[in-house]
Image: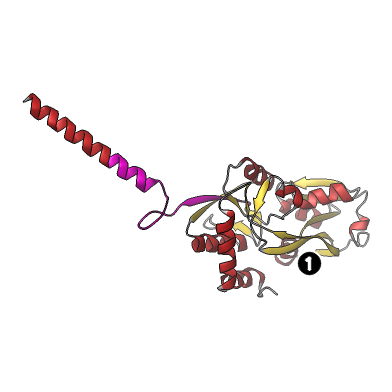
Amino acid sequence: MKKVFTLVIALLSFSLLVACGTSGDSASGEGGEGGEKETYTVATDANFKPFEFKDPETGEMKGFDIELMKAIADEAGFNVEFKSMQFDGLITGMQSGRFPLAIAGISITEERKESIAFSDPYYDSGVVLMVNKDNSDIQSIDDVDGVTVGTKTGSTSESYLTQNTDAEVKAFPDIINAYMDVKTGRLDAALYDLPNVKYYIKQSGEGKLKTVGDVLEAQSYGIALPKESELVDDVNKALQAVKDNGTYDEIYEKYFGSKPE
């Protein structure tokens, strides 16, 4: 009886070891033939239409950046899930390596490249002044000294204002609040990314807003990654493939009304 009992225990132990080994391989997400795709969390900001925003009915993330990131992930062979946060927290999260990817209309700057990595550029942008339609005193960036200008916390627009003007800068976590204050006269102007400013004027300006002056700080958006990330090459190859196969143009036209030049 003792020998039988010992044999049963040995068989059970062997079965348990086999089961544990199989479970570990399956959960590793290493991919390969028959394996599961790796899933990466992508940090984003839900307040930057038309690049990223939450569908009010479903709560799902939508926008140009969101669809582009999904297309890149599909091409590169991994899955993505999005986590929304304030823009300044997003940059900090990338610098600390908390997130493997981020997309949120992030301008590629030399300062940011010192602490995080970027993909190849995927969208060319710049910043522009928005004022109330009745405002005739502010015609360009040269006219903002001494007046109150709103912008987004942690953005290149905030840096531009503090480094190049004597304006009183009021930074908001959500740029929409700055736009609303310009519309109601609580702010003299707002400075932010051109496509977002134009989108707000068209969708919610109610004929009360306009842009003035030149487009400033011409910069490109890139997908952000932690410094020395091994995903940079995969993302760049997938981005180029999405451009080459026409998917990029389709997504661009969907959100901007025309194909890119």
Q: Residue at x 49, y 62 (%)?
A: 74
Amino acid beneath label 1: Gly
In this view of the protein, which residue sits in the foreground, 16 or 70? Answer: 16
Magenta segment range?
Answer: 19-45
Is residue 68 something one can see in this rendering?
no
Figure quadrant of residue 252: bottom right
Say whether residue 259 is left or right of residue 82.
right
Is residue 27 something one can see in this rendering?
yes
Quadrant, the N terminus: top left
- Asked if the stretch drawn in magenta spans residue 42, the answer is yes
Figure quadrant of residue 122: bottom right
Task: Please tell me whether mark 1 sits on a helix, a strand or a loop.
Answer: loop
Q: Label 1 belongs to which residue?
A: 207
Residue 158 in the image: state x and y as whole percent. 79, 49
Q: Residue at x 59, y 55 (%)?
A: 232
Say whether residue 71 is left or right of residue 47.
left
In this view of the protein, which residue sits in the foreground, 131 or 157? Answer: 157
**Residue that sits furthest to the top in the current view:** 2
Residue 44 in the image: state x and y as whole percent. 61, 51
- Asked if the stretch drawn in magenta spans residue 40, the answer is yes
Q: Residue at x 61, y 63 (%)?
A: 64
**Residue that sits furthest to the left in the current view:** 1
In this view of the protein, which residue sits in the foreground, 240 or 86? Answer: 240
